[in-house]
Image (cartoon, helix red, strand yellow):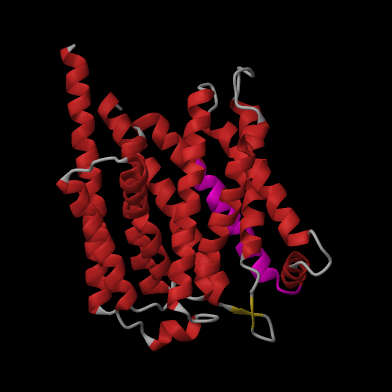
Amino acid sequence: MDFHGRRAAELVFCITGIWSAYIYQGVLQETLSTKRFGRNKERFEHLAFLNLAQSAVCLIWSFIMINIWRKARGGRAPWRSYWSAGITNTIGPAMGIEALKYISYPAQVMAKSSKMIPVMLMGTLVYGIKYTFQEYLCSLLVAGGVSIFALAKTSSKTINKLANPNAPLGYGLCFLNLVFDGFTNATQDSISTRYPKTNTWDMMLGMNLWSTIYNSIFMFGWPQASGYEAVQFCKDNPEAASDILYYCLCGAVGQNFIFFTIRRFGSLTNTTITTTRKFVSIVVSSLLSGNPLSRKQWGSVAMVFSGLSYQIYLKRKKSKKIKRKKKAF
């Protein structure tokens, strides 16, 4: 196989890995939030437990990968560097998962796709950053699409599957998830700048170490904490326990595919793959999980992903310009 054929095969491998891991994780996440388990047909109400379980599995996974692949030991960020990002990395995803009690999975994916809006808003108001017309157009398409989706009538079948339907609360939790994610990403960027030898597995280990500590305190820190009930539910319902394990493994495998994609093809390619994956997740959810979308909602989905696709195109165009300037010098 020649160089171009090998590169194409690697890209297909990355796309397949990321899509498979995260689409299946999305299906499991929706199943755990809507399905009724056991003879008594009980819901798994302790969705925050998913955050602890995934943190623990990713912690073990990253520790194994570091010890298998790492050669040089010096120069990585100390564990204490991650304590603050660990807090927001604990609270943010927990809010995103908790939102599934109040809104459908496609609605959650749509809301979390609007990450660029608070980023641009904070950049303009706090740092005085000026954006181009095209960037504002992308933001407008995404914001408009999410708004139309939220206001469109949701099918009664979808509403009946939710534990406590409450759209304002669900979207509010997703917005807070984005705010906390923004702080987490900014802190991770700062750590990468201060400690250049820190790779993704180092960061994965540091982040999940603190997340596991915080989540363990939250879930088991007092006698009435819900972690005990979650464990008992898993003992009584092995099917739920296996779904949680697969959910966590999907997250760990997905993170490794993302790491490989960024290393081989760059962050822009990774962004393109993960963005299209979100759209496919909505389609899969609608077809397999019984969440029918109205025409208006499908139109809003098209608006959001048109905006995101245009944003990726602008980034790629900007990246090519920078490369041409570097070559000229």
Q: At 31% from the left edge and 66% from the top edge, which residue is drawn?
A: 146
In the rendered image of this protein, does residue 288 appear above or below residue 244?
below
Q: Is residue 120 left or right of residue 81?
A: left
Q: Which residues are magenta?
A: 236-255
Q: At 23% from the left edge and 31% from the top edge, which residue is drawn?
A: 319
Q: Position of residue 6 (x, y in %)?
A: 32, 30
Residue 43 in view, yes or no: yes
Image quarter in which the N terminus is found: top left
In the rendered image of this protein, does residue 300 appear above or below residue 185?
below
Q: Quadrant of residue 91?
A: bottom right
Q: Is residue 28 left or right of residue 12?
A: right
Q: Position of residue 211 (x, y in %)?
A: 65, 48
Q: Position of residue 172 (x, y in %)?
A: 46, 67
Residue 2 in view, yes or no: no
Number of labels in the image equals 0
Q: At 29% from the left edge and 24% from the top edge, which residue is drawn?
A: 3
Residue with the most extreme right position: 223
